[in-house]
Image: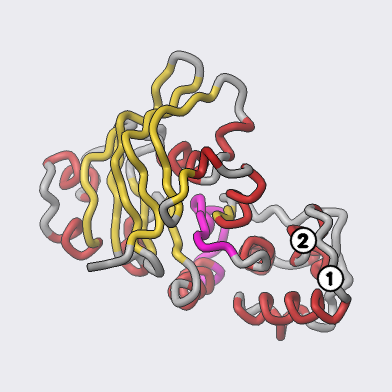
Amino acid sequence: MESKILKVDKLNVYYGKNRVIRNINLSFDKNKITAIMGPSGCGKSTLLRTINRMHELVPDARVDGKIHLNGTDIYEMNPILVRRKIGMVFQRPNPFPTMSIYENVVSGYKLNNTKMRKNEFDFIVEDTLKKVALWDEVKDDLYRKGSFLSGGQQQRLCIARALAVRPSILLLDEPTSALDPKATARIEELAEQLKESVTLIIVTHNMGQAGRISDNTVFLYLGELIEYGSTEQLFSVPKDKRTEEYLSGKFG
């Protein structure tokens, strides 16, 4: 039996009077990659943002239900701590533009006024950039702005920034949709390596990507959880007709 790191219980999410997530019950396996799929507007990104309380930055957002991280209700935790334990990487690479590569990686510590010696920060920067296979490409340019990097390198820098504070879970919201095929392949390869140390939850429109890298897949439709299971099972013998129609391209 897989250990469950995150449990979503009777979750409803509202923007004003509009309910965009409808009574979802879901649990995520530790050190696995779970893909969240479904047509545009079905609630994928909203679910992801709710898991690390980013939805609270949207006016009129409201949540019913519980989300437990290792048994602790995230709504009883400080939101800053939640976002350290549950990191997030967005669709478009967004390194902090005024910061160097080095400063981007350790920004989570600096923004929280965490006191460390320079050699400790140096270790975190090198160790984290090695984890995202970026160290050899940028080690001579650590004090240049991250904006000089290619799109794929910038996205790996954003993943490094999220990983530097040692989260338990990494949320990836369509992290390769703005990248070319070569950079996409690098990110996919990276995701498979990272699951040894962190649990990954990825929103993707790319069925091929979900099939290549995810262990489990969630299918959402109109804010409801339609089907959840191993990616192999869900792709080959979906239990629900809507899943089958989505996977065969009848709607999207």
Q: Would residue 179 be counted in the magenta stretch? A: yes
Foreground residue among 129 and 31: 31
Residue at the spot 74% in from the left edge and 57% down from the top edge = 95
> Quarter of the image holding residue 178?
bottom right
Few, some or many residues within 10 Å of mark 1 (<14, 14–19, 20+): few
Q: Report whether 173 appears left or right of 106.
A: left
Q: How is the image coloured?
A: secondary structure
Q: Which mark is residue 163?
A: none
> Quarter of the image holding residue 146?
bottom right
Residue at the spot 51% in from the left edge and 54% down from the top edge = 171
> Quarter of the image holding residue 163?
bottom right
Q: Which residue is mark 2?
A: 109
> In this rendering, is residue 62 above or below 110?
above
**Which of the two discs, 1 and 2, labels the residue nearer the N terminus?**
2
Image quarter (top left, top right, bottom left or bottom right) of the C terminus: top left
What type is the residue that disc 2 sits on? Tyr
* Marks 1 and 2 close (CB-CB < 8 Å): yes
> In this rendering, is residue 66 above or below 166?
above
Residue at the spot 57% in from the left edge and 57% down from the top edge = 85
What type is the residue that disc 1 sits on? Met
Q: Which residue is mark 1?
A: 116
The image shows residue 161 at horizontal and vertical percentages of 69, 63
Q: Is residue 185 visible?
A: no
Q: Is residue 22 visible?
A: yes
The alpha-carbon separation of the residues under discs 1 and 2 comes to 9 Å
The image shows residue 191 at horizontal and vertical percentages of 48, 70
Span colored in magenta: 167-183
The image shows residue 43 at horizontal and vertical percentages of 40, 35
